[in-house]
Structure formats: C-alpha cells, structure tokens
Image: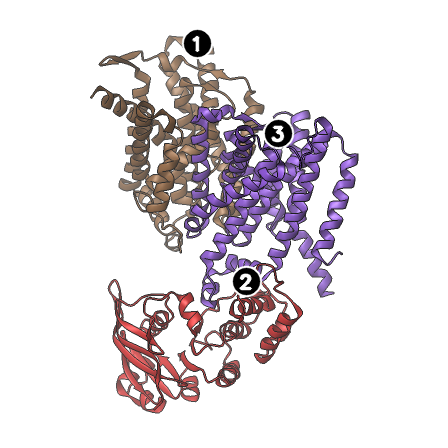
Chain colours: A red, B brown, C purple
Amino acid sequence: MSEAVLVAEAIDKTFGAVTAAQDVSVAVPKGAIWSLIGSNGAGKTTFVNMVTGYIKPDKGHILFEGDDITKLSPREITRLGIRRSFQIPQLCAELSVLDNMLVSLSINDTEAPSYWRDARTRNDVDRAMDILQRFQIADYSDRLMGELPAGVRKLLDIAMAISGAPKVMLLDEPTSGVAAEEKFPIMDLVMEVLSAADVTILFVEHDMDIVTRYSQRVLAFYDGQIIANDAPDEVLSDEAVQRYVTGTAK
Amino acid sequence: MELLAFILVDGLIYGAWLFIVSVGLTLVFGVLNILNLAHGSLYAIGAYATASAVGAYFALGGDIFPLGSYVAMIAGAALVALVLGPLLERGLLRHFYDRDHVIVVLVTYGVFLILEDVMKLIWGVTPLFVSEPYSLLGNVELGPLFYVTYDFLVIAVAIIVGLAVWFVLNRTRRGKVVLAVIHDREMSQTMGVNVDRVFMVSFMIGVFLAALGGALTAPMISVSPGIGVNVIIIAFAVVIIGGLGSIEGAAIGALFVGIARAASVHLLPEAELFIIYLVMAAVLVFRPEGLFQKVQARKI
Amino acid sequence: MLRSVPAACAAALAALIAIGFLLPEWAMFLTTMAFAKGLVALGLVCLMRAGLVSFGQGLYFCVGAYVSGLMANWTGISDIFLLSVLGILAAGIVAAIFGPLLATYRGIFFAMLTLSLSMILYGTLSKMTVLGGTDGLNVAAPTFLGYAPEGRALGFALYLFTCVVVVVTGGLTRVFFNSEHGLIALAIRDNELRVEYLGASVRTEIAVSYAVAAVLAGIGGVIAGLAIGHVDPEFSYWTTSGEFVFVAILSGYFSIGAVFISSILLELVRSFSNLYFPNTWQLSLGIFLLVVILLLPNGLGSLLSKLKRKERRT
C-alpha cells in the first residue's frame, strides 16, 4: 500500500448548532482517485474547505506529506501543492479566458511574477493556449465569462487550478450544472490530464454514475461523519449509505 | 472640578448637535445601504431654508408671536424633505442600486457638488443671518457661566428625535417593517413588504433630519456657502464610531465625540480638529463595525 | 499606433514640448497643475485596478507638498529634483506604515479609513501655527540643477519638468499595467478568492498598489506646491481627495493618457466656469460625474479599449 499523502486526524468542526465534522479521520494514499459523497450539509465541502485552509477545524490535524498544514492559509496550502476547483466556478469575470489562464500561469511559473515583464509575451500566450487546447476550450480564448457555456466555465476553473502542477487535486462537484451528455466527456478530459502527472485526486460528486465510473474508493459523509470508506460498489450497496445518502433504501 | 462640569455641559451640547446632524445619515445607511455624501448639503439647505422661512415669518408679521418662528424652522426642514427626498431617491439614486456601493457613494458625491452650487444660485453667496430664534429664549446661568438657553433646546430636540426614532422603529408596526428591511431586504421583499416605499420614506426622513440639523444650527451661525462641507465629514466620523446603521450607536458616538472634543478644547486645543478623525480611524482599525455592531466590516 | 512604450513616451514628450512653446502663460500653468493632479489620479487608477477606491489621496498630495515646501524653506534646498526625491521618500514612508494595515480592508471601509487618515493630517496641520496653520506656507521658487529661472521662464521650466515626470511615470505605469503583477491586480479586482487560491498574496499586491499610488500622489503634491508657490492644509481636505477620485472615475482604468486628458478637462471646466459662470463649476462637475457614471461605467478610457477590441475581432 502506497504511503499516505494526505491525512486527516480526528477533525471536529461545528458551526453553531450544525456539526459539520465529527471525529473525521482518513488517510489518502498517493496517486489515489477517491470520491466524496453525501447529501447537502453532510460535511463534504467543509472537509474540502478545511483541507484547503479556507476554514480551520476546531480540533484535530491535517497532514500533507507528513507535515501539519492545519493552520496554514489557502495561499500557503496552494503553494505546497494542494489545489482545488470550485463548485461554482471562480473565474475573473472581466478578463478573457486567455487572460484568466495567463494569471494562473504568471502566479505559478517557476519565476516569481514580474513587475515589468509583459504578461502577454508570445511564449506565455502559447503556453496558455496549449493548456486551453488540452482542455478543448481554446476556441473560447478571447471570450468573457458571461459568454461561456457552463461546461466551459467548469473546465476553465479546473484548468486554472491544474496548471499549477498540483500534487493533490480536490474537485468540488466537477460536473454539477453541466448538461448530462457533457458530464462524461468532461470527466474523461480532466482525468486524462491529471493522470498524466500522477496526481492524487479527491472529488465531491452527487452523480453516482460518475462516482462508480471514475473513483477507486468512495467516502460517504453523513452528519459530519464518514459512514463508509470502501470501493464504490460496496459503498453504494451499504444500507446506511442507501438510507442517508443515495436515498435508495428499500 | 469646575473644568469637568464645563467639559460635560459643552460636550453634551455639542454631542446633542452631532446626534441630530448624524442620525439621518446612519438611518439612510441602515435602510438603503447608502453612505450619503450629500448629507452635509442637505443640512446646509435646511439652514438656508430656515433663514428664508424665519425671515418670511417675521416679515409677514410674526413679531406678535415670535415663538412661532420655531414652527417656521421645522416647516422649512419638512419642505426640504418633501421636495428633495423623492427627487433624489426616486429620481436619481434608485437607478444605481444594482451597482457597487462605492458607485452609489460617488453618485451622492455628484449630488453634493450639484447642491452646493444650487444653494449659491438660489440664495447667493453673501452670508445670511437669522439670529432671532437663538436669542428668543434668553440665557441661563449655570454656576459662573452663562449659557444661551437655545443650546439646551438643541439637547431637548436631540432627545426627542432620538426617542421618536427609537419608538417608531421598535414599537410601531411600520417601524418593525423598516427594521425587517434593514435586517434582510430580500427576505422582506418576498414577504410582501413594499421595499420601494420603505426606501423612499426612510430617505425622506433622513433628509428631514439633516435639514432639521441645519435648521437648528442656522440661528447660531452665519449661513453661508460651504457650511455643509465640514459637517458631512464630522457626521461620517460619528456614524462610523457608533456603527453604520445604528441609531443607538449614533447617540453614543455623538456623545463620545462631543465630550472628547469639549475635553480637547479645554485641555489640548491643538487636538481639537483632528481628535474626531483619530477616534474614527482607531475605531475602524480596532472595531470596524463600530460600537454597536450592525454591519459586518469587509475585511479579509 | 506606436507599439513600444519608450517610443510612445518619446513622441508624447516631443509633442508636449512643442505645444509648450505655443502656450500662453496661464495655459501652461493650468497644464502643469492638471498634470500634477493627474499624477495623483493615476495613482488612484492603480488602486482601482486592484478593486479599491481611496478617498484620502489628499494625504500624500499634502505630504509631498509640505515636505518639499518645508525643506525648501528650512534648509534652503531648492533643486526640484532633490525636492521631488524627498517628497517621494516621505510619501513612501507613510505608505509603508499605513499600507499593510489598509490592505486588509475593502470597499466602503477602505474608503473611510483612507479618508479619516487624510482628515487627521488636515486637522493636525490646521492647528500647527509653526507650519502656518490654516493659512499654510509660501514656498520659494525651485531651481533646476543650478538654473534659477524667473517669471515666464520659471513657468516654462516647471512645465517641462512636469511633462518629463508625467511621461516617465506614465511609461513606467504602462509597463506595470502590462506586467504580470498588473494582470494579477486586475484579477484581484474581479475575484480575490481565486487569486489567493492560485497562490498569490492579495494583501501584498494591494499594499504595493497602495504604495505606488502614494508615491505618485506625493510627486503630484511636490509639483503642485512649487507651481502655486504655496501649500496649505486644504491639500489634505476631503474635497481635494474627491476631485482626484472624480478624475479617476472620468478616465477609467484602461488608458493612462485618458487620466491626464481628464485632468486637463477638469481644470478647463473649472477655469472657464469661474470666469463666466462663477457659481456653476461644481454644478457642471457634478452633472458631468453623474453622466459619466450612468453612461460610461468604465470611464473615458474604456471607449478607447472598446474600439481596440472591435478592431481585433474584425
């Protein structure tokens, strides 16, 4: 069994009367592709938010490659190699698709961003278009966010996160808001790009077809706890999961 | 010991004036979420309106009942509110509600610029004096010092205004509707509240209170162009200190600033002008939501 | 269209110098003042590109003016280059102190905090009789690397100096706007959260933009003080800051030339209003501002960039 790259130890988190996490512990091995399922409010997004530093757990630790990252800021965690995409794509609405990509490249280049070097050099633009090409959204390069179909927005959001060569990638509902016939193509594309770099992937999903097709293991959340941690078929046929998550209990 | 008494009385008088001048600003922010930079101009127009109203009153034979000039003052302020309130809110500001808050502030800045010159065009640039109401109530002796009774009238008006606003907001049905809009605009709308009307009425009351402040002040000063320019910035400070949108905050903030300034005048005159902004900056740094939290400060 | 920034700067400078020979004295003074204030507005544009509006740039305008004025009066330093450096240093130091703190605020609260800082300076200076109180101080005429002109020659020398400063800072700012940090600033304006999640420090970017704005305002203040020959606390009053915001709103944040053109427009409206319709210049300004906000939400400069985008598409 390969070494755990991401470890959560006894995480607790409450928001007033709501328990978002209760003694959550999990160890994700390197290179794993896992999914997180659970109904709304079960704690999956809170988990993602805590791992990426947006909120801090009340108790417990989060370890990345052995180091404690519990108290770090989102920016520091990003720089360590943990990146995320957003359920509602977080894009810069007044910048073109190409400019969005260039921002991501500027920040994530091996050289620090410059105060005088042009952001749109031939080289940078080519690299940005390259990435857009791989995600098959290069045709939209000069459009603004408002002109993009939902699937393209999602792909751009994910592309911006991935362009930083992450070690761990958290995808928050990568196919939500996307037309049914686009879901598989989008996931195929994303997985193809990510697998080329041996990235550990965690994705939050409500669509069980996506879950079964793409993940090796499923974490089922309910009421702030992980009630199942197993291969997709086992988890989806688990009684508790059927009652509390998928709603398919007999 | 005597010094302390002077500071308290001066502070109370100045604080009362500050409250009347600032409460309209905080009300408008609380309900409409607008930081009205033209508030000072409305104050000034109130002062000019009083000058005209009182002047007309005495010219039309008001000498037989001089106290009636006070009614003329209030009537002047009310007229300003009835005319400018709907004109500004419905005619202008409404078009910018969907934009960034800073844009709305800039619009009110444009209104400020326009009103400053409108005042000059209507009333000219020579200072106007309307001192009869000030001396009407005579003087009162407090220890070794004489105070003009009118100053205490200002305190009385401040208390009445404060209690009235509090009462209407907390004890009447209409007031509770306004509180609901302050608390959650969208929710109130879905509950069937006519938010448009609430906005307009609240804005009109804000204008009235600003004009009232000017009206009360007119007999104490020479009414001339630019009196509003300084007032707006002081009102801002009071409102920030007390908490944007909070009436109680405006009262406590006004009292606090009033006493701070009185203390400064008596003890450290060099600080008189900047003490208020120092307190404002300190509040913004340490407790941005003000003394009475109503609005969350946007901080990272 | 001149592609390279240095070429555009050289052309602009040449044009301005040529025009300078033709301008009557009052026009030259007006342009100098408009440029000085335009520098402050340019700084505001830098901040606006990061999503913030400062209502207190008068603080640095005043710091620059007073520091250079006081240095000239007290130490006899009259060289304009030296005084400018001193003004820049003073503005920079103040910005280094307050910038990081301010960089944690946004929207109205940022605006109010900057406003209160400028008013604190106003209040302090107004009461300091040693610095002239509300009357302010007269400032001796500057010298230019040993050259001590008077009369019309002084006006021309100041105009020239200002044009050089404008062209150089304009060029540097354009390079900054085009740079990677410039693009990141625009992204911050749009979606701060995303930029943090990409790994950049929003707070640092904003602090830098704020420092740039402060330094630009400082230079503007130095020039304005020397051009008028007088400095007073009004430089830090909120209405002064308001005028800078007005110019920045009018010009928008895409074109640097638009900033200085807007500033000249403002000065022209002010001068002609004062001459022919004495009580209407604020009225005109106010109406102007409302029209711009209503019709041109991104300022005059955005007209230019809209035209450019149309060119690229077709």
Label 2 to label 1, Cα distance in Å? 66 Å
Instruction: Indicate which label's residue lies in the foreground, 2 or 1.
Output: 2
Provide the chain ID for the residue under circle 3: C
Observer-nearest residue: C139 or B87?
C139
Question: Residue B50: horizontal and vertical position, in percent?
Answer: 44, 21
Provide the chain ID for the residue under circle 2: A
Question: Residue B25: horizontal and vertical position, in percent?
Answer: 40, 37
Provide the secondary structure element on which disc 2 rests.
Answer: loop
Callout 3 touching callout 2 (CB < 8 Å): no
Observer-nearest residue: C185 or A34?
C185
Question: Residue A174: horizontal and vertical position, in percent?
Answer: 46, 77
Q: Name the residue under label 2.
A: A93
Residue B37 seen by the camera? yes
Provide the secondary structure element on which disc 3 rests.
Answer: helix
Provide the chain ID for the residue under circle 1: B
Q: Name the residue under label 3.
A: C228
Q: Check disc 3 and give the amino acid type.
A: Ile
The quadrant of the image that shows the N terminus of chain A is bottom left
Instruction: Indicate which label's residue lies in the foreground, 1 or 3.
Output: 3
Residue B61 disc label = 1
Observer-nearest residue: A71 or A213?
A71
**How busy is the neighbourhood of tag 2: few (under 14 within 10 Å), some, or many (20 plus)?**
some
